[in-house]
Amino acid sequence: MTSLPLSGLRVLELGQLIAGPFATRILADFGADVIKVEPPETGDPLRNWRLLHEGTSVWWAAHARNKRSLSLDLRQKEGQEVVRKLATDADILIENFRPGAMEKWGLGFKELHALNPKLIMVRVSGYGQTGPYRDRPGFGVIGEAMGGLRHLSGEPGRPPVRVGVSIGDTLSGLQAVIGVMMALRHREQQGGEGQEVDVALYESVFNMMESLLPEYSKFGVIREPSGSSLPGIAPSNAYLCKDGKYALIAGNGDSIFKRLMEKIGRADLASDPKFAVNAGRALHAEFIDAQINAYTAAHTLDEVLVTMTEAGVPAGKVYDAADIAQDPHYQAREMILDAKLPDGSIVQVPGIVPKLSETPGQITREAPTLGQHNIEILTELGIDAATQSDWKTRKIT
């Protein structure tokens, strides 16, 4: 078995739910030894979110794979001391508590850095570790709103809608992983020490907002929601087909637009100078969309997709879970994997990304039960069996 790229790295995961644990899942997929610290008895609340199988969320099988679980009460001094012991030999610590919580427990960056100067501490919060809003509670939904995404979502003149997943959290998890990789590069290649990586939910969303701020700054333009279209980029929209399904067609490249128009029988538009570049097409986006809609309305979704593929025009359908599970491309790319639940039954989980040619990620551990690795981890720290038994009785672990 090829050694994974992050083999040998030890990661402590403190916190719960989505943002921080999503980051550690990626690190674990590529070989890091992730120790997930959870509250005794209850564990991470995500264990009980959405649809449950024998009392545990099936989401958990994807979210916590490749990790070891240590149940530990961080409010008690013994639990805090265990974290200090773990941090002494750890490479990375990722937490997503409200700013100030770790300092209250004597586990802030200054304290842990003094114990282990090489430690990289990633802190994920709603508003960051500084600034006037730092102490406000912040979930992904609030970060999405403050970051500008919610304002752009939905149909014009209607209430803003949310993306159907916790995109603010997962974007923050990705930013956390990027921060880890940069800090590791600094530490290992440039002889640096560990450092603090500050990730804010709203900033992770705002970082994706493309032209939102530059257009306001220069022209005073406030972008508004636009439904399924992409304002200023044409044509790019969802078009209703004869069978009631939608085809997403992105014909916004200059040469692509020409091929698209020729394929739908509108060679006159393909050769029209005012549509030769995007700026001209954007001025007539509604007209162009109407021509494409007239074509798709006369054909089924499958017919449209075959025609677009023949013409080299990017197009696709709107996938639901059943489409994804049955799609041959997902399967060929190993993006649908089987995982075992505690009772031995199988659940499908998302595959591993990105794809590395020489050291691809792997699932080497199933998602742990709460405290599954307590004895293993505490014994590694030199904590004797009698103490472990006492801590379990006192609900420290």
Image (tube, grey):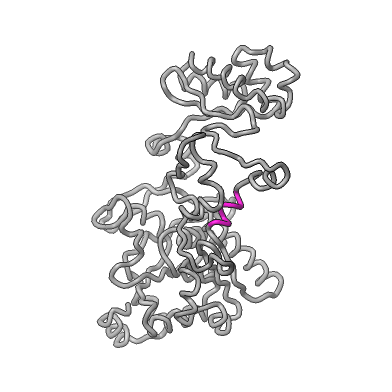
> Is there any visible trace of residue 1 in the rendered image?
no
Q: Is the stretch drawn in magenta largely helix, strand or loop?
A: helix
Residue 68 position by quadrant = bottom left
Give the percent coordinates (x, y) of residue 56: 29, 57
Give the percent coordinates (x, y) of residue 213: 66, 48
Q: Nearer the viewer, residue 72 or 210?
A: 210
Residue 391 position by quadrant = bottom left
Q: Does 134 sit above or below residue 307?
A: below
Give the percent coordinates (x, y) of residue 353: 52, 50
Q: Is residue 42 left or right of residue 221?
A: left
> Is there any visible trace of residue 155 in the rendered image?
yes
Residue 61 position by quadrant = bottom left
What's the magenta region? Answer: 202-208
Number of numbered markers: 0
Q: Does 4 sit above or below residue 357?
A: below
Q: Is residue 170 magenta?
A: no
Q: Is residue 204 magenta?
A: yes
Identify the residue at horizontal 37%, vertical 36% (top origin): 322
Picture quarter with the C terminus: bottom left
Q: Nearer the viewer, residue 294 or 32?
A: 294
Identify the residue at horizontal 55%, vertical 72% (top origin): 121
Identify the residue at horizontal 59%, vertical 34% (top origin): 230
Identify the residue at horizontal 64%, vertical 28% (top origin): 234
Give the percent coordinates (x, y) of residue 119: 57, 75
